[in-house]
């Protein structure tokens, strides 16, 4: 793990920040670097994308953290990547061509947070109906939703 | 009609006979959407034995069923599917909303869950509980049978007879 992180800092220099809060390794990086960093880490043995999700930090700018969890199957080690995005249409490059499992995860992240993944082969909603309004896991989304409740049926 | 009284014959209107037959042979369309479905399975299994009330023939196809047991919370994404399956059931048909979620949304007062399946299809019997006990579902079946025998929900109007047939 230590060697991989050293090689990572050697390759990407100032663009990545490595820290270990609570003993969990976190790498923070700009959105533009995500594809090259995960490609590098996969070549170093982080062969499994465990999770890809986002955190809405409403009030902060940039507003969202996109979080990636990688797992090293031989060393049994975890790694977290964090990318900050914001703006009207928060956009990060897709890593679906690096990890196939990112395909569904990025669709869910788009569905729930409205984060666009540039280069994703099929960026559609995955959980909510196709005609759904809004992105439910955003902090400013009302609990009971924006879509009207259907009226009662009487026969 | 003389002499009929002392023979083993009963008289009834066709309507009454049809209602009696319908109520004694309900074929449920199983619609397990969540944990209520576990209790629905228990109701049909040996301990509670739904077949004592003639409603044990759980059908996986709506076309072979006449009572839909909606067992669980209905999400907005599921709602059009529930409606389509209901529309595919032949008349006469009835609906049991099993449990708090199917009745009024239950604890899920949120964006994802329809607040009661009666916003999608008409409901005849609501069963309270989270989940209801098998006895609760049996009671619903018994109440539905009573409702059917009393006339219940009217059947859809009969197909109009084409004029050339009516005249002949």
Image (tube, coloured by chain):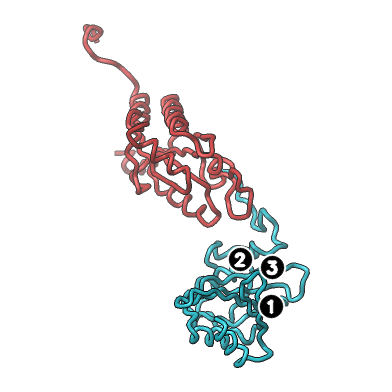
Chain colours: A cyan, B red
Q: Which of marks 3 and 2 is nearer the N terminus?
A: 3
Taking the image as shown, residue A29 lies to the left or right of residue B18, namely right
Q: Which of B25 and B36 is in front in this view?
A: B36
Q: Nearer the viewer, residue B11 or A66?
A: A66
Q: Whole-percent x and y of residue A2? A: 57, 83
Q: Which of B31 and A7 is in front in this view?
A: A7
Q: Badge 2, how many Cα within 10 Å: few under 14, some, many 20+? A: many
Q: Whole-percent x and y of residue A135? A: 64, 65
Q: Which of marks 3 and 1 is nearer the N terminus?
A: 3
Mark 3 and mark 2: span between their CA atoms? 10 Å
Does residue B18 appear in the picture of this structure? no
Q: Mark 1 lies on which chain?
A: A
Query: In this picture, is B41 found above or below A83?
Result: above
Total count of labels:
3
**Residue highlighted by disc 3:** A56
Quarter of the image for residue A88 reads bottom right
Q: Nearer the viewer, residue A56 or A77?
A: A77
The residue under the point 45% across, 52% down is B84
Mark 2 and mark 1: span between their CA atoms? 15 Å
The residue under the point 69% across, 72% down is A64
Q: Is mark 2 on a helix, strand or loop?
A: helix
Quarter of the image for residue B101 reads top right
Q: Whole-percent x and y of residue A95? A: 54, 81
Residue at the right extreme of this rendering: A59
Does residue B47 appear in the picture of this structure? yes
The residue under the point 65% across, 83% down is A31
The label number, if any, that marks residue A74 in the structure image:
none
**Residue highlighted by disc 1:** A85
**Residue highlighted by disc 2:** A112
Q: Whole-percent x and y of residue B116? A: 57, 44
């Amino acid at each position: 793990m230590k060697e991989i992180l050293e090689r990572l800092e050697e390759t990407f220099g100032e663009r990545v920040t490595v820290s270990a809060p609570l003993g969990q390794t976190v790498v923070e990086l700009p959105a533009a670097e995500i594809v090259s960093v995960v490609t590098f880490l996969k070549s170093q043995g982080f062969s499994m994308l465990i999770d890809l999700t986002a955190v809405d930090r409403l009030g902060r700018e940039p507003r969202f953290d996109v979080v990636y969890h990688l797992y090293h199957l031989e060393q049994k080690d975890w790694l977290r990547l964090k990318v900050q995005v914001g703006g009207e249409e928060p956009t990060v490059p897709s890593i679906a061509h690096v990890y196939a499992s990112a395909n569904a995860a990025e669709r869910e992240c788009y569905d729930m947070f409205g984060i666009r993944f540039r280069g994703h082969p099929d960026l559609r909603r995955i959980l909510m109906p196709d005609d759904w309004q809004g992105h439910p896991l955003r902090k400013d989304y009302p609990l009971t939703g924006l879509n009207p409740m259907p009226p009662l049926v009487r026969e | 009609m003389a002499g009929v009284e002392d023979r083993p014959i009963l008289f009834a209107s066709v309507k009454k006979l049809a209602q009696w037959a319908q109520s004694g042979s309900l074929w449920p369309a199983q619609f397990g959407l969540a944990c209520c479905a576990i209790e629905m399975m228990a109701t049909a299994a040996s301990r509670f034995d739904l077949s004592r009330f003639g409603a044990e023939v759980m059908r996986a196809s709506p076309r072979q069923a006449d009572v839909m047991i909606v067992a669980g919370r209905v999400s907005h994404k599921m709602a059009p599917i529930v409606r389509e399956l209901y529309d595919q059931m032949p008349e006469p048909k009835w609906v049991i909303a099993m449990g708090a979620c199917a009745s009024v949304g239950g604890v899920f007062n949120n964006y994802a869950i329809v607040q009661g399946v009666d916003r999608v299809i008409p409901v005849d019997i609501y069963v309270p509980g989270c989940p209801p006990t098998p006895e609760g579902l049996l009671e619903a079946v018994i109440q539905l049978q009573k409702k059917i025998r009393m006339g219940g929900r009217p059947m859809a109007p009969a197909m109009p007879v084409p004029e050339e047939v009516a005249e002949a």
